[in-house]
Image (tube, rainbow, N blue to C red):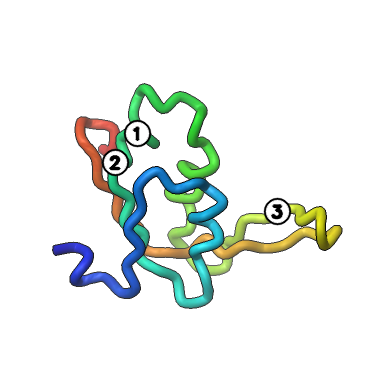
Amino acid sequence: MVEATCHNPLITVNASPAAVYRSITGDPPALLVDEADTIFGPKAGDSNEELRGLLNAGHQRGRPALRYDAALSAVVTIPTFARKRRCGVGGALS
């Protein structure tokens, strides 16, 4: 139901942080993250910190992530604004 009502839905499971960051463009997708309990749950530890940071941020346009691109020898800005819906089991998403 959620996918059918979203603009440009992108359903992800076990996506790398780099892939999710690069999927957010000027016309951002709606990120539909399944199994979010594995990212936010008690067993996740510090293993998904970058992805948690992206999913918790990006609620407002104009707040990019900064990364250093060694190939360009420059700092690049990566947009973070996107609509997000997390789905999982248990109380990890409250």
Residue at the image point whose x is 49% and y is 63% from the top: 23
Say whether disc 3 or disc 2 marks the residue closer to the N-terminus. 2
> Which quadrant is the C terminus positioned in?
top left
Vertical comparison of 40 with 79: above or below: above
Residue at the image point whose x is 19% and y is 70% from the top: 4
Q: Amino acid at mark 3?
A: Arg
Front-most of residues 85 and 34? 34
Q: Which of the numbered marks, if any, corresponds to residue 84?
A: none
| Residue 25, x across and y down, in percent | 52, 71
Number of other residues with Cα within 10 Å of mark 2, as a class: few under 14, some 14 to 19, many 20 or more: some
Number of other residues with Cα within 10 Å of mark 1, as a class: few under 14, some 14 to 19, many 20 or more: some
Under circle 3, the secondary element is strand
Q: Are marks 3 and 2 in contact (CB under 8 Å)?
A: no
Residue matched to label 3: 67
Front-most of residues 38 and 55? 38
Vertical comparison of 67 with 10: above or below: above
Residue at the image point whose x is 45% and y is 24% from the top: 45
Res. 40 image quadrant: top left
Residue matched to label 2: 35
Q: Is residue 2 left or right of residue 22?
A: left
| Residue 71, x across and y down, in percent | 81, 58
Q: Amino acid at mark 2?
A: Glu
Front-most of residues 58 and 39? 39
| Residue 84, x across and y down, in percent | 35, 57
Q: Is residue 72 left or right of residue 89?
A: right
Residue matched to label 1: 38
